[in-house]
Image: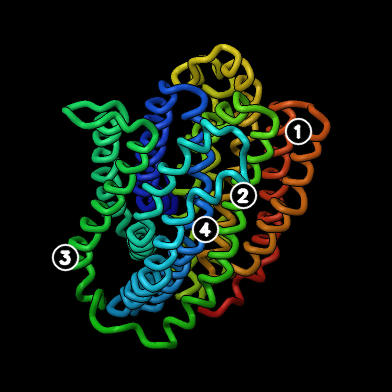
Amino acid sequence: MTNRSRKVLHLALPIIGGMVSQNVLNLVDTAMVGQLGDDALAAVGLASFVNFLVTAFILGISPSVQAIAARRVGEGKQAESAVALNGGILISVVIAVPWQTLLFYSADLIFPQLIDDLDVIAAAVPYLQSRVVAMVAMGINYSFRGYWNATDRSMLYMRTLLVMHVCNIALNWILIFGHWGAPALGPTGAGIASAIATYVGTISYAFLGLRHARKEGFLIGVPPWTTLKTMLRLAVPSGIQQTFFAGGMVAFFVIVGKVGTKELAATQVLTQLLLVGILPGLGFGLAAASLVGQALGRQDVEDARRWGWEVARIACAVIFLLSLPAIFVPGWMLHFFIHDAETLKLAIAPLRIVGISLCGDVVGMVLMNAIVGAGATLQVMFVSLGMQWLVFLPFAYFIGPVSGFGLTAIWICNVCYRLTQSLVFALLWRQGSWARTSV
């Protein structure tokens, strides 16, 4: 193993550990809620993506924190690297507090516009209300994630995530089913558990920041306007991209919901199993973003280019192993989460197709994050929005609700869109205009 491969794994493995723990949490959450039936499973799936939609702009702050902090590390200005973290926290608080308050009181107006099933709506509304109250904590947590990854301290990120997930799983068990004298809150209990765990993570990150980043400027004064302006220049395209991507996922769930509730329940499980490969791929992508940002801080464009390709190659090898169960034993994987025989049958072929395409999907994810790490968030925004909204969603709607080809055809369309997007990001990385971005 080369020194460069060791460096990739040293940075990426703690991030992947955190991502895998997130995936385990998602799967445990899905398995627990799945015991309540298809309506509960569909409600949590739809409401989760609505929550992703309404918080997505806040999450766009994290890449700007990571890009700026990594560039300062590469420039040899470690003592200034936490200034971007301070800016991320400030922006998160200013935007999230009023936004989450508004959403809490308007949640019951959202779901009747998305789905007609009254049982699904009844479960989705309180679940979303429980989740949005943690929006400010989520924004702060993602800012810390960007900072720890940029400064090669991803282990701190992983440790905090593990604490959060243990807390979340325990609270799920208590609040969903009513153990230890607690009321059985069903899907709402899952939402409350996630919100509490998110705030636990914020408290943990704050203590770690005071311990490890104080000398680098953490919570020492308000960031200068020039820093905030640069952050907003990078964060706005990333936030828009995240928001429209999340909106596209909500639209995807709405499209599937028009086909049927069983299809919607199956899609919730398929999405969580897709994350088994996607989240480790995202972990490699975040590592690539840091390595690229640091190389550009040293003004070594060729080294930055090499990091993108090398991380993509390593990620592809790892994800290939993870994809094998989905290809060869999809029914065995699904039976842990889906307890209705007809719904289970619907999900088998789409899961196998996802497994076959996973390596190509992950290469695109790594290179997309490498471009973001270079600060070229505008490029990523245009590609992501164009592919999802102008290509995938119209085709999915035509293939599913209009033509009636069913769930497997919709997921084939999804896979084709993501592989095409991966090809576009590979061409952009090879072309190299990302290297001219000023941060």
Question: Can you say whether 389 is above or below 70 in the image?
Answer: above
Q: Secondary structure at mark 1?
A: helix
User: Does dot 4 land on a helix, a strand or a loop?
Assistant: helix
Amino acid type, mark 2: Gly
Residue 364's disc is 2
Q: CA distance from mark 3 to mark 4?
A: 30 Å
Extreme-top residue of the structure: 341
Q: Nearer the viewer, mark 2 or mark 4?
A: 2
* Residue 356 x, y percent position in the rendering: 64, 29
Q: Nearer the viewer, mark 1 or mark 4?
A: 1
Question: In whole angstroms, how far apart are the C-alphas of marks 1 and 3?
Answer: 53 Å
Measure the C-alpha gap from mark 2 to mark 1: 26 Å
Which residue is identified by label 1? 400
**Can I make out residue 202 in this image?**
yes
Report the residue marked by disc 4.
307
In the image, 137: left or right of 68?
left
Which is closer to the viewer, label 2 or label 1? Answer: 1
Task: Tell me which corner region of the image, top left, top right, bottom left or bottom right, holds residue 212.
Answer: bottom left
Q: Please tell me which residue is depicted at 53% across the width and 53% down the height of the picture.
A: 53
Is 131 situated left or right of 364 in this image? left
Mark 1: amino acid? Gly
The answer to the question of whether label 2 and label 4 lie on touching residues, with beta carbons closer than 8 A, is: no
Q: Could you tell me how far apart the alpha carbons at marks 1 and 4 are, in whole angstroms?
A: 40 Å
Say how many tags the image has: 4
For the residues bearing labels 1 and 4, Cβ distance under 8 angstroms: no
Question: Element under label 3?
Answer: helix
Q: Do callouts 1 and 3 mark residues in contact (Cβ within 8 Å)?
A: no
Assess disc 4: are there few (<14), some (14-19) or many (≥20) residues with their C-alpha within 10 Å of its C-alpha. many
- The mark that comes first in sequence, 1 or 4, is 4
What residue sits right under mark 3 in the picture?
Answer: 211
Q: Earlier in the sequence, mark 3 or mark 2?
A: 3
Specify which label sits upstream in the sequence, 2 or 1.
Answer: 2
